[in-house]
Image (spheres, rainbow, N blue to C red):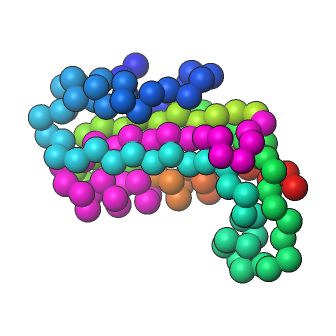
Amino acid sequence: MNDGLDRSTQMPSVDAWLAQAKQSPQAGSVGMYLTHNGVVRETAKARIRYGEENTKPVVGMTFSYDAEKAEAVIAETYKMPGIYYIRMWMAEGERKVGESLMLVLIGADMRPHAVDALDYLMGRIKGECVTETEKF
């Protein structure tokens, strides 16, 4: 599969993904590829999102996802204007600070469409498809 959800257990190469995307039938319509690499950060979500000052440093995370829900979100994202290519990979299990949780590649006709699609996709994935448990 050259687009959609990549279910491999090891983190794929963004360079390989880009090479494959540029060979896809939709490549002629793409004017921009946008990538996202989500990683485990040391700063707790409560501090980043809610301003809680008294949080301990994060030392790791347990991460999982619902593949069927993720595939449905990807299909919905393809309905957005100018979106021609989407590829996503997510980790599962225990991850340490600095390790990757997910990769996303979006091919769109222009930058605003790619940015809007990434924002939509990530909002839905994080809100509906993943379970993240920080470890302190």
Q: Position of residue 98 (x, y in %)?
A: 65, 46
Considering the image in quadrants, where does the C terminus appear? bottom right
Residue name at image x 73 percent, y 73 percent: 47
Based on the picture, tell me whether residue 114 belongs to the magenta stretch.
Answer: yes
Q: Position of residue 71 (x, y in %)?
A: 50, 36
In the image: residue 48, left or right of residue 62: left
Q: Nearer the viewer, residue 42 or 124?
A: 42
Relative vertical location of residue 54 with respect to residue 87 in this rendering, above or below: below
Q: Which residues are magenta?
A: 94-120
Res. 71 visible in picture? no
Residue 105 found in image quarter: top left
Residue name at image x 12 percent, y 34 percent: 28
Relative vertical location of residue 4 with respect to residue 33 in this rendering, above or below: above
Considering the image in quadrants, where does the N terminus appear? top left
In the image: residue 5, left or right of residue 84: right
Residue name at image x 72 percent, y 63 percent: 43
